[in-house]
Image (cartoon, grey):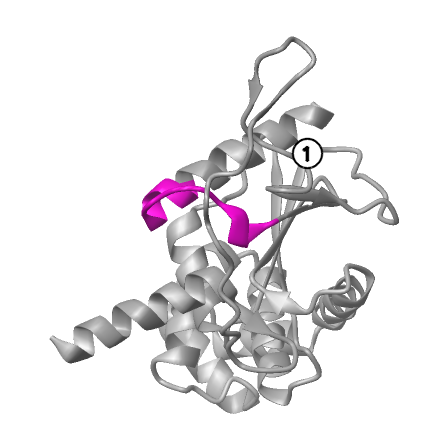
Amino acid sequence: MRHSLAWIVFITVLTVSGCDKDKELSTDISQKGASHVVGDADGQPQRFKEGVHYVVKKHLPPSSEPQIIKFISYNCPACRFFESTSKITHTERVVVERFPVSFSREQWRDTARAYAVLRSLNIHEQLSGQLFKAVQDKHAPMGDKTFFIDWLSGLTTLSQKQIEDAYEHDKVAELMAMYKAAERRYAITSVPSVYINGNIQIKLKALEGETQLDRMIFLSELTDYLIAQVE
């Protein structure tokens, strides 16, 4: 029972805080009380409030099409929990991308490259969960090229030559450069972080709800609300 309670506390900290750039796990837990509700232009209650649930980054340009960017790391337990519960996925009307950060950490950079290879092969959605499992449960050395090729060949019908070619392809280097540039441009200091339409940051600590399911429903409705602003 004591171990179960400790695990619940740990997951709660992860859900609220995430993984910081300067430390593995933040313990700064924000309050989750209900915020003041103001009216919209028609006098109706406005559920989602700028400055409370989301922030518009004025220095960033908005995207021309509906877009969601999830900044994560496969080394971050909070990101794994968020990915398994949020279910924010690509649809016909919304482009959803994961941008793995490295925070100048070698192991985080290795897993970002592993994801970039999956992305270049267009199997990233199917194998994202497997990558989390390999990194966090089995402490797999994703920076070892031979290991990575063996690991991926065991999960797919791809030949080792196909995987090696993808691993060494310029596309992977381009993706890694894009991820690093985005990490700097968006000034990411903790993960998970979610941006909508290029310049709107979701304040994940401010999601409302008594349970994780409630908070994820709130997140889904909030993203729908923000996406609608550019449709």
Look at the picture and state if 51 lies above or below 162.
above
Residue 93 is inside the magenta segment: no
The residue most toward the left is 1
**What count of labels does the image hold?**
1
Residue 21 lies, in percent from the top left, at 65, 76
Look at the picture and state if 227 lies above or below 174.
above
Q: Nearer the viewer, residue 36 or 66?
A: 36
Q: Residue at x 18, y 79 (%)?
A: 3
- Dividing the picture into quadrants, the one containing residue 224 is top right
Q: Residue at x 41, y 44 (%)?
A: 215
Look at the picture and state if 173 lies above or below 46.
below
Q: Amino acid at mark 1?
A: Pro
Q: Nearer the viewer, residue 228 or 129?
A: 228
Look at the picture and state if 47 lies above or below 201.
above
Residue denoted by label 1:
66
Residue 82 lies, in percent from the top left, at 44, 57
Q: Quadrant of the C terminus?
A: top right
Q: Which residues are magenta?
A: 203-216
Residue 213 is inside the magenta segment: yes
- Crowd class of label 1 (few under 14; some 14 to 19; many from 20; radius 10 Å): many
Does residue 38 appear to the left or right of 12 in the view shown? right
